[in-house]
Amino acid sequence: MTTAADQVLKGLFSEAGLDDPYRYYAELHKLGPVSLLEGGAGYAAVVTGYEAADQLLRDPRFLVADDVFSDELSGPEWREHPLLTVLNNSMMYSNGPRHTQARRLFQQVFTPRRVAELEPAVGRLVDGLMDQLAERLAVDGEADFMSEFAYPLPSSVVAALLGIPQADLTWFRPRVERINDFLDVVGKTDEVLAAADQATRELSEYYRTLIAERRKAPSDDLISQLVEAVDAGLHEVSDDDLICNLLVLFNASFVTTIHLIGNGMWMLLDQPELRTAAATPAFVEEVLRYEAPVQFVARWSEVEASLAGTVIPPKEIVLVVLGAANRDSERYPDPDAFDARRVDVKPLSFGAGPHYCLGAALARAEARIAFPRLLERFPSLRSARPPVRNPQQFLRGYKSMPVAT
Ligand code: HEM
């Protein structure tokens, strides 16, 4: 048996849905803020209403999919996979004390002050990448904005934050992408998992070596501070936990911010009249609302739980569609219009509640610094050919974006 929402989800998880998920979200909104699913796809319900999504993410009954859930779902076999072990040991996929311990440790060192201190370095990285973009434009007459700028910026910034040498990033990026391939809502094949497992092994070893080096010779980077805090014994976090969290933090930072930068740039190329607003925080918030880089998160509950009048069965995955919540007409008038003058924009693009994105301030800072500088340096930047979509459903953005001056 299938429900009306199952039918819509089928369309959403197709080529047409990749191209334009918003028409499917509009269909789901018509069915209500929470819809039950019967037809497989691995989800018991889909949440699209803004209030319902916000409420669910803050509700302690709803948990991220952790080791307990993995045991329920597939037995203990997941422990044989380095990737799944790392994910389940990280704060992003833990609940209760394990989550609190790791989150507190990272919050102790990854403070708003540290983000503010990093801003000049972000500016320098933006300038360096703009030099490369200018060179490519001069040599080839056009350049791919995604590969020349949007992809390298976030990984360079998180590397600067953590203390990973910039020269190591060419080794790093393909491994992070193998992990990312497995995290999509569709396409979790054995081959994809095997490649992600191998990438996890290699990245874990890399972090283990870096931790040992920083323990011997501390620097002023985040890894040194994390190691110092762990060694001070104030947090019940081991080196293994630290590695899992560093791996997940790098990944979470890199694959998401790319699309904030790419989606914002596309708005500026496609609607040049928006350029006067590009330096305002409101522009960045509207980009985040309009095209959430992370479209979905997931939760489950040990017990039957009612949400917005719908009873959600226990021990089943609930799909929370952040991209749909941000386009809920109950929350935002004319939600499908991009309007950088909106007030009271609080997109759910960074989630909400205990797992609210740890790097939200850093991602916003990168965008706020990058857009005006790009427009100042390349005032006549234009789209050379239509951009190509990133093929992943859960990360909304572009794979390539040819630009010219
Ligand atoms: C535009 C860029 C970004 C977007 C859209 C984004 C989105 C998100 C979302 C939706 C969550 C919540 C996941 C959930 O509730 O299940 C999250 C969590 C997280 N993000 Fe981000 N993120 C971005 C950038 C960053 C950056 C720059 C960093 C690190 C420097 C980062 C690190 C994390 C971490 C560690 C978590 C897990 C927090 C926890 O479980 O307590 N993110 N992010």
Image (cartoon, rainbow, N blue to C red):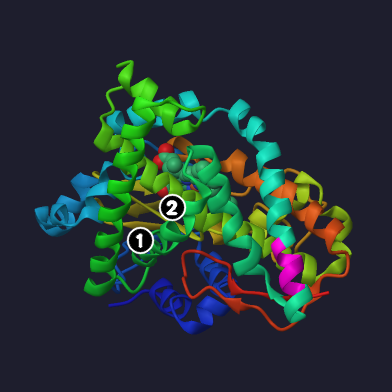
The front one of 159 and 100 is: 159
Q: Is residue 333 above or below residue 147?
A: above
Q: What residue type is labelled 1?
A: Ile
Q: What residue type is labelled 2?
A: Asn
Residue at 29 percent of width and 54 percent of height: 202
Res 62 visible: no
- Marks 1/2 in contact by CB < 8 Å: the verdict is yes
Q: Is residue 281 above or below residue 78?
A: above
- Closer to the chain start, of discs 1 and 2, is 1
Residue segment shown in magenta = 132-137
Q: Magenta includes 302? A: no
The spot of residue 220 in percent (x, y) is 52, 27
The spot of residue 289 in percent (x, y) is 65, 55
Secondary structure of the residue carrying tag 1 is: helix
The spot of residue 355 in percent (x, y) is 44, 40
Residue wearing tag 2: 251
Left or right of 271, for residue 214: left
How many residues crowd mark 2 within 10 Å: few (<14), some (14–19), many (20+)? some
Q: In which quarter of the image is the N terminus?
A: bottom left
How many residues crowd mark 1 within 10 Å: few (<14), some (14–19), many (20+)? many
**Residue 179: mark in rendering:** 1
Residue at 33 percent of width and 65 percent of height: 182
Left or right of 34, for residue 227: left
